[in-house]
Image (spheres, grey):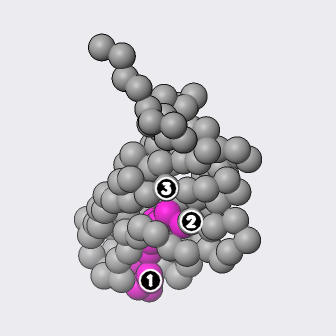
Amino acid sequence: MKIVFPPGARNNLFDRNPIEIVRAYDNTALAPAVDTQRWTYTVPAGKKFQIGNAQCHQQQDGVSGVGSNRRAYIAITPSGGALTIALIAQSQFNSNGENRDLVGLQGHILLAGDMIEGRTADPTSTGIVNGVTITMQGIEFDA
């Protein structure tokens, strides 16, 4: 069966030179640290990007001498715009095994020049480590 597009119609994105892009960061013993970029992806010129799946997970292992605002997150910076948190696993509780796990952003479209990044932050806790996972998968295709 031949599929015909009407004049002026565009092919589906999966027919426009698709490339799967995956970014991941996983650390089971992350020491407290300032806000840190763990991975990044910028959509190239002439391309678009559709997020298939994104996940942020953060788990506290131990009890901190000082409580803190621990977070693992995904941020998007549009071309010419400001960084915006799009998905965040965040905890302010101070108990062993405390965790947050979020999945989202399915179908979100990024344009050429837009940047998506995985980041972590645990600026004030002491005496503990965190388990952190930040992943993103999607399809880059011709604009």
Q: What residue sits right under mark 2 in the picture?
A: 76
Circle 2 packing at 10 Å, graded few (<14), some (14-19), many (20+), is many
Query: Where, by quadrant of the figure, is residue 5 drawn?
Result: top left
Instruction: Inspect the magenta stretch and tell me whether residue 71 lies in it.
Output: yes
Circle 3 packing at 10 Å, graded few (<14), some (14-19), many (20+), is some
Position of 74 relative to 16 (above/below): below
What residue type is disc 3 on?
Ile
Give the spatial CA distance, label 3 vs label 2.
Answer: 11 Å
Does dot 3 land on a helix, a strand or a loop? strand
The label nearer to you, 3 versus 2, is 3
Q: Is residue 50 visible?
A: yes
Q: Which residues are magenta?
A: 64-75
Does dot 2 land on a helix, a strand or a loop? strand
Circle 1 packing at 10 Å, graded few (<14), some (14-19), many (20+), is some
Q: What residue sits right under mark 3 in the picture?
A: 109
Position of 24 relative to 11 (above/below): below
Q: Is residue 128 visible?
A: no
Q: Which mark sits nearer the N-terminus, 2 or 1?
A: 1
* Residue 105 coordinates in the image, percent (x, y): 38, 59
What residue type is disc 2 on?
Ile
Q: What residue sits right under mark 1 in the picture?
A: 68
Instruction: Inspect the magenta stretch and tell me whether residue 97 lies in it.
Output: no
Camera-side residue: 53 or 8? 8
